[in-house]
Amino acid sequence: MQAIIMAGGKGTRLRSITNDDIPKPMAQIHGKAILEWQVESLKANHISKILMITGHLGEKIEEHFGDGSRHGVDITYYREEKPLGTAGALFYLKEWLTENYFLLVYGDVLFDIDLRRMEKFHLEQQSCATLFVHPNSHPYDSDLVVMDETQRVIGFDSKHSKRDYWYNNCVNAGLYIIGREICDMVNKDDKTDLEKDLLMPLAAKRGSIYAYQSPEYIKDVGTPERIKVAAEELSTGFVASRNLMIKQRCIFLDRDGTINQHRGLINKEEDFVLEDHTVEAIKLINRSGYLAIVVTNQPVVARGLCDIPDVIHIHNKMQTLLGQHGVLLDDILLCPHHPDKGYPEENPLYKIACTCRKPDTGLIDICVQKYNIDLASSWIIGDTTVDIQTGKNAGMHTALVLTGEAGKDKKYDVQSDLTSNHLLEAVKAILQIKDC
């Protein structure tokens, strides 16, 4: 791919660092300019042809990087004489583009990502624009991306909306793969906002826009406080460790009886109530470097008690409640099937044998491929012997919690590696083993 970096803007929020002597993307993090971190990440992904769109104090950027040869890349510049928004300059860049799509990144974003995975997703979906999205720790005051079950973007949920509803914690991170045809939608010298003027209208028309979700590190570092946090995360190695080129460790979590109170087959949002220690437990996972992924059997769909969108609505409640406390889940996977037939209201489409229903490992296998997970270094926590058998089948460590069914289902004769009173106790024990 070729890459375009939006490196203009005055950086008012960073004036205490830049003193208006350097442009915002030249602010330093951990001894290196933001743009240098970006160029190094692009080079690591074999992206060497870069165009920087500059504006305020753009000559400082050009003086520092030159033609890019010192950094092992080829850099070209386009200087905006007047601000054209986050996409207005794309009108002038069509001649520079030699491929059908390109990477677009904002100049105040720090990232360490396996971009080949995102590019593969973009090509498989035949997308005209792919957004890098992720859950964050403050979805309640973030602009959210709304997707359908295929990850097609169908709308945007503004942070200014009155959210008296449950929502999916899915935030646009400011990094895109854009089809060349998007440039044809930009008029000469028009100030154009990428999301508002281009992507939102396409999403409203059910255009070919997709969201690529990843737990990899990407952070807006446009304030002094965020730069300080990013510097700490760089120094500890946390930033590099999240790159999906590197094997990831994961704590897989059962849902009913582990995260939320066991109340039989839950098919209504009001029946979903978090266990007392859930928020603190998942917060510890988020800080630990492990991924936190829910894998849950939901036979309520096969039983005909509700449909998959109803389960997703309940999961949105779970994400909203967690997000209110700065806690996130990296993914949620569900199995809607159940092989046993004979219920009067059952849905025959889901009354089948499958490989995704625990203790089979289908959901785990999807995560391994999607997130490059090392199962030998990973755990599953649940309240049933089904969960423990799932871990055994997948080659993971296992932890039984004495909430929910507390292992009394007795469906499998298995012994967990750990037994804990609740989720928080289990997570603390796992992290202590890792630290030792």
Image (spheres, rainbow, N blue to C red):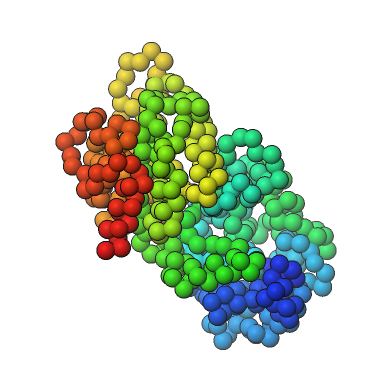
* Residue 49 shows in the view: no
Q: Position of residue 148 (x, y in %)?
A: 56, 39
Left or right relative to 402: residue 186: right
Q: Position of residue 40 (x, y in %)?
A: 53, 75
Task: Please tell me in which quadrant of the rendered image residue 156 appears.
Answer: top right
* Residue 425 shows in the view: yes
Q: Is residue 299 above or below residue 91?
A: above
Q: Position of residue 418 (x, y in %)?
A: 24, 47
Q: Nearer the viewer, residue 179 or 153?
A: 153
Q: Position of residue 17 (x, y in %)?
A: 67, 76
The residue at 76%/62% (across/down) is 85
Report the number of numbered marks. 0
The N terminus, quarter of image = bottom right
Quick one: which residue is furthest to the left in this view? 413
Q: Nearer the viewer, residue 123 or 250?
A: 250
The residue at 40%/32% (across/down) is 261
Left or right relative to 231: residue 84: right
Q: Is residue 205 above or below residue 434?
A: above
Quick one: which residue is furthest to the top in this view? 344
Left or right relative to 411: residue 211: right
Task: Please tell me in which quadrant of the rendered image residue 110 appears.
Answer: bottom right
The C terminus, quarter of image = bottom left
Q: Is residue 107 above or below residue 299?
A: below
The residue at 38%/56% (across/down) is 290
The residue at 29%/31% (across/down) is 405
Q: Is residue 123 above or below residue 53?
A: above
